[in-house]
Image: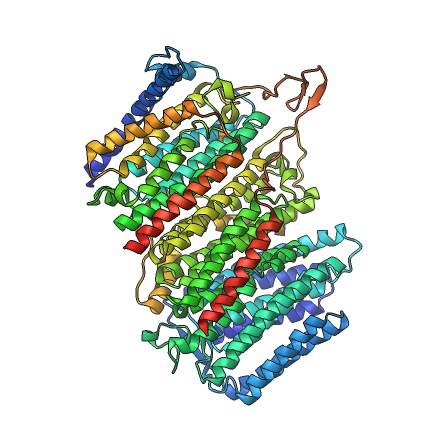
Amino acid sequence: MAAPLALIGFPLLVALILLTVKSGAARSIVVIAASVLLAAGTLSLVFTHYPLTEARFHVSPALTRWALLGLELALSAFVFAIGVRRRRLLVSLLALLQAGLSAVTGLLFEAGAGVEHALSADKFSIIMAVIVGVVGSLIAVYSPGYMEAYHRHHGELGDRRRLFFFLQFLFLSAMFGILFSNSLPLLHLFWEVTTLCSFLLIGYDGTEQSRGKAFLALVLNMLGGLAFSGAILYLSATSGPLELDGLARLEGLGGFGALTRSGVILPVVMLAFAGMTKSAQMPFSSWLLGAMAAPTPVSALLHSSTMVKAGVYLIVRLAPVLQGSLPGVMIALIGGVTFLLASLIAISQSDAKRVLAYSTVANLGLIVMCGGIGTYESVWAAILLIIFHAITKALLFLSVGTIEQRTGSRDIEDMSGLIVSMPKLSIMVQIGIAGMFLAPFGMLVSKWAVLRALVDFNPLLAVFVVFGSSATLFFWVKWMGKLLEVTKAHQNLERGIEAKQWASLGALAALTLAICGFYPLVSTLLIEPYVIDIYGTIRTMSPGNILIMSIMLGLVALFPLTFFVYGRRVKVVDPYLGGGNVDSSFSFQGAAGEVKSMRMSNYYLGKAFGERTLSTAGLIACAALVLVSFGVAL
Amino acid sequence: MSLPWLIVAIAAYLVGAPLAGGLLAGIDRKLSARLQGRWGPPILQPFYDVAKLLQKENIVVRRSQSFYIYFFFVFTVFTGGLFFSGGDLLLTIFALTLAGIFFVLGAYKASSPYSFIGAERELIQMMSYEPMVLLTAVGMYQVTGSFFVGDILAARRLLVLSLPGLFLGFVFILVFKMRKSPFDLAGSHHAHQEIVRGVTTEFSGRTLALIEVAHWYETVVVLGVVALFFARIPWLAAAATAAVYLFVILVDNVFARVKWQLALASAWIVAATLGVGNILVVFFLR
């Protein structure tokens, strides 16, 4: 029990310490020391406890029950007060409902009274813990330097950095709580804490705009929280299993407690609904796009290792129950529609952060799809996706945030010539982009697996992936192209980025590359045993294919070698511009003799892939699917 | 396939594919000329062209632009090796995409407005044909139970009988893949519908020669996929592949280039109807 408690307790302790530290330098030291310890701690879990047998920990039900109820009500009261203070009736109303539900389940049905093992740790939660620990810590290391510059640039904003770092570590603590909770009421408590943390972090700036977006995130996630509570109430009332490892197993392997699948499917769909709000599936995707208002480390945290990953974690956990059920298919369809539409919308976006956000929504859709169909193949693919996506997305967000701070723009069109003005960062962005969609890098391995899992289940679902991934190819490559193309001389803008920031960026870039080489190992040691534990069977990539992927990786790795023959045996000229070039490679003499300059700009195809039309379509389609999934679960 | 045979097959492919691809390109040019009322160059002209290009000075705008083309070449060759040694069809497609992306990045790197536009259009073309290519792999997997070309080849039935929609759809996107009118947005072999040479504008000398040879390899690989549909009966496979190739040349000479909207929409509609329809029929009849 020591390890899970330590991982929940340590960040909480650090958070409290950070709340009291006033000096910036001292704060940096605390943050870095804590991050290193945290990353080392999660990694040591794997090394010292291998081969991880599932561990369940007994906590006195009476104790947790009252403590839980108290904390839940306190949280609701806090949110209620915020609603009243900011005159958001809806928020207060939702908080009241939440409090009511918690009170009814806690007092009338004595929820949690029968929960013997409130905490547990298995291979899946350990994998997730390593992701949260390592990626979350790297983001934390990056933060002090960024926030320093952030407040230099935005003098008008109040400096609430103590709160910021407090929330960041509280968030990590709650994330570990979600991963190690076996009791659903306990999991719900941590779930609500992440909702509250993300609300406060998104609204960090305290401006009218950021506050609006924070409330959007709060309302949508509270809806999910309500559904979660509803599931707990339902299970308590029908004396169903309130322990996750009892609920989410195949029927033959001791799942569902005393009930049959038809008895637990409704609460499971409610839990999956909560998962979909948290992982920003359509029709709830708007909150994640709004979360861009926050400082970059917040977006990186929300998009990569925490928050949205909590949602898909829960759905993948529930996969064995959803497998082969009609509501499961509906959830898979929601994921599919989200993947397709978000990928298409990303084509029309030139704001780098919005492209990243839509890509996050899309990839989460892919994972939700895997969870919805819930076969052993798809669960393997889903866990791989979670790992690759967390690392790569954190790298991309932090890189774009750094670029924005140095150049004052995060528009992709302004990234022209970045390979000259910010060579190191530009290469990191390229590594990140390649990691997101290109063979033989990580995400593509999982896309290969997803495609096969879907075809085995129902090829109609593969259609979403087939069209969606074609769109991802377009928007990623044109971004890469913009980074490479150079039309004029640029100053180097990379000076002034702190060593801590470089360390964090460099580590994430190295991880993105390393995981491509090491994923077979991660798969054999952790993912496959987990899938076998749950399903009793497994199907992975054949050794031959892994070899071929490795050969491709080796070939791509040769690319940097080209710099040794850089510019040998070539004659350099100005490009052809359709007229005589004048002085430089970007202005020319037009047909009437006047000097014209040229400009190159990417295609965004806004008419064909308009954000508004496609979002509305997704909203309607997915809202209908959500209703149907509840309808068929009844 | 045993290891010695594997090596023989790969060696045969490495040498044979560019020879076959070059010859096909020669036949293409001769036939196109005849269709247009010209005498046309000798069949071996593509080889002469490449030999000449190899001797020319390498002129570039950006010093690193050629590197991308080298990798385009390497991965195109690799893709074919994967395909003809019986490898995973999905991986083959992904490798071919990777090769295509290096080609596009080279054009971006050249930093000329014409190659830039060419790169954008090449990407639109890739986005257009990719779904149909993936659906083809999906369909073959449904019928044969394997993504491996070797297993698909060994299937006991004539694939085209189960997958007629996918076959027609694949022929449709073959026009994109072989860079033929009406879907030659990124760069056309027909001088009359091109202001500047599109995606290859800033490439010359041995780099351009490599692009040509890579395209030969590419042609052989995509025609190999066509042959897979008929693999059960070898003579039929040969005849069908030849017929498809001639058909694409005919189409190339009959149609003028279309705008990207029509190109993308038509390819996706074909994939969504012929491709998806065929897959669903196979799924429900099984």
Residue B194 percent coordinates (x, y)? 52, 21
- Between residue B93 and residue B95, name the one nearer to us: B93
Q: Is residue A564 left or right of residue A589?
A: left
A466 or A22: nearer the eye? Answer: A466
Identify the residue shown where x is 47% and y is 31%: B103
Q: In the figure, B120 relative to A425: above or below?
A: above
Q: Is residue A604 above or below residue A587?
A: below
Colour option used: rainbow
Total marks placed: 0
**Residue placed at 32% from the left, 55% from the top?**
B284
* A130 to A348, vertically: above or below: below
Residue farthest toward the right in the current orientation of the protein: A156
Residue A594: give x, y in percent of width and height: 72, 17
Q: Position of residue A275 (x, y in %)?
A: 52, 66
Asked whether residue A157 appears in the rendered view, the answer is yes
List the single residue furthest toward the top.
Answer: B39
Position of residue A567 measured from the top left corner of the image (x, y, whole percent) = 52, 24
Q: Is residue A504 visible?
A: no
The residue depicted at 76 percent of the width and 70 percent of the height is: A87
